[in-house]
Image (cartoon, helix red, strand yellow):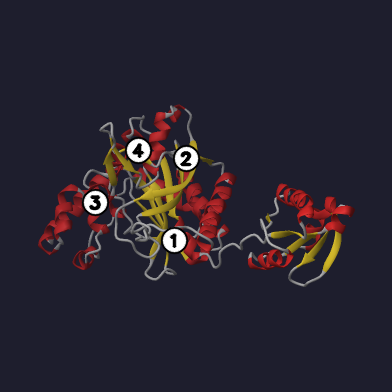
Amino acid sequence: MEQIGPVRGTRDLIGEEQRRHIHVVETARRIAGAYGFDEWSTPIFEDSRVFSRTLGETSDVVTKEMYSFADRGGDLLTLRPEGTAAICRALVSNGLTQSLPQKVFYAGPMFRYERPQKGRYRQFHQIGAELIGTAEPLADAETIALARDILDALGIAGETVLHLNTMGDLQSRLAWRQRLVDYFREVKENLSAESQARLERNPARILDSKSAADQALMAGAPLIERSLTDDARRFWDGLRTALVRFGVAFEENPRIVRGLDYYSHTAFEFVTGSLGAQGTVLAGGRYDGLVAEMGGPPTPAIGWAGGIERLGMLLAAPPAAPVPVAVVPLSEEAEPAALKALSMLRHAGIRAEMAYRGNARRRMERASRIGAGFAVIIGADEVARDCAQLKHLGSGTQSEVALEGLVAAIGRSA
């Protein structure tokens, strides 16, 4: 019979890969909790309008990458390609726009139909944080500091560099947009076909182009810095000052852009060169108009998302698997005492296993195969004395221990 493998662009998380994944999520969850962020979970599929409204009807994600389908009732649904829009939908749906600010952490799978590559999959996983309801630059700085502290707790902050830019306020972006249009119209015939299409609709997205021809023209493109209003410049100055006070190092990168109108002010990326070509492992920005796109009131917000796969690849080593304890009854009569010992160890949070069958030799062989650190050996004599032989499988030393003192003895010897 034909063997069925995983769908292209997906993978199984087993062993080391799963430990890396769990370590990233649990570390991020712990640091986010220290910052006062509560964890939310949203469905993995949503009404397709949640994403078409917020990602832009003509964006590559919406037109080429979303997994969308009509269910049996005829509703058009989409597997979530990102987390922010779903969080904003949940905020509005649950009537929380009157209870601001909300500090939200999330973790889970996302789905995009794109070419699989190193650290990127069609089903991928993200951690993310959203601070909704606060318009001050200090909120942006704190949210970025949270991301930096998560990277630091993972031991990979030194592998990344924070790139920072401003998108200004709406008035700034309108002025900049006109300057971009004026500039690129002069060289329109040299632009790629895709960038020519973007020129009138969304010229800022030309700066995202991977076309070599387009990139050659970007060097002379106007920067938003010259178009900033006084208010936007004060915000930009306040953000950088707050980041310095948080002790967050950054490099200004005027080429980081966000193409949709609801993005404003802050845009940032933590990038690394440790995964081959320089790549982004965590990115975000301010999106003051997104909650309104979900039917809520105008609401300021700042957030980011990080790819768990790519963050996990940066870890120097995966967390070690817990070392189990093997319980070895020497006879059928010893099994009740062995089961009692097994339960005691597990209730104490110690990973413990016992082979279901086999003689003592085979059970000891299995203890070795599973990498047990200790063997708890119980025979007829031990049953009579309500004790066990505790054998350290690394050194080979062995001692008699009362069953009631088994957990403490393993703790002392570990």
Residue 85 horizontal/vertical position (percent): 36, 41
Q: In which quarter of the image is the C terminus?
A: bottom right
Q: Mark 2 points at which residue?
A: 41
First in sequence, mark 2 or 3: give its number. Answer: 2
First in sequence, mark 1 or 3: give its number. Answer: 3
Three-letter amino acid code of the residue under disc 3: Lys
Three-letter amino acid code of the residue under disc 2: Ser
Residue drawn at 47 percent across, 40 percent down:
41
Per the model, the C-alpha gap separating discs 1 and 2 is 22 Å
Which circle, 1 or 4, is nearer the viewer? 4
Q: Mark 4 points at which residue?
A: 46
Three-letter amino acid code of the residue under disc 1: Arg
Q: In this view, does 25 lie to the left or right of 289?
A: right
Tell me, yes or no, whether the two marked residues, 1 and 2, touch with CB atoms within 8 Å.
no
Is 234 located above or below residue 282 in the figure? above
First in sequence, mark 4 or 2: give its number. Answer: 2
Q: How crowded is mark 3: few (under 14 residues within 10 Å), some or many (20 or more)?
A: few
Q: Residues within 10 Å of mark 4 (few under 14, many from 20)?
A: some
Residue 166 horizontal/vertical position (percent): 36, 51
Label 2 element class: loop
First in sequence, mark 1 or 4: give its number. Answer: 4
Per the model, the C-alpha gap separating discs 2 and 3 is 26 Å
Is 27 located above or below residue 400 in the figure? above
Per the model, the C-alpha gap separating discs 1 and 3 is 23 Å
Q: Mark 3 points at which residue?
A: 64
Tell me, yes or no, whether the two marked residues, 2 and 3, touch with CB atoms within 8 Å.
no
First in sequence, mark 4 or 3: give its number. Answer: 4
Q: Name the residue under label 1.
A: 310
Per the model, the C-alpha gap separating discs 1 and 4 is 25 Å
Q: In this view, does 240 lie to the left or right of 215?
A: right
Residue 4 horizontal/vertical position (percent): 36, 58
Label 4 element class: strand
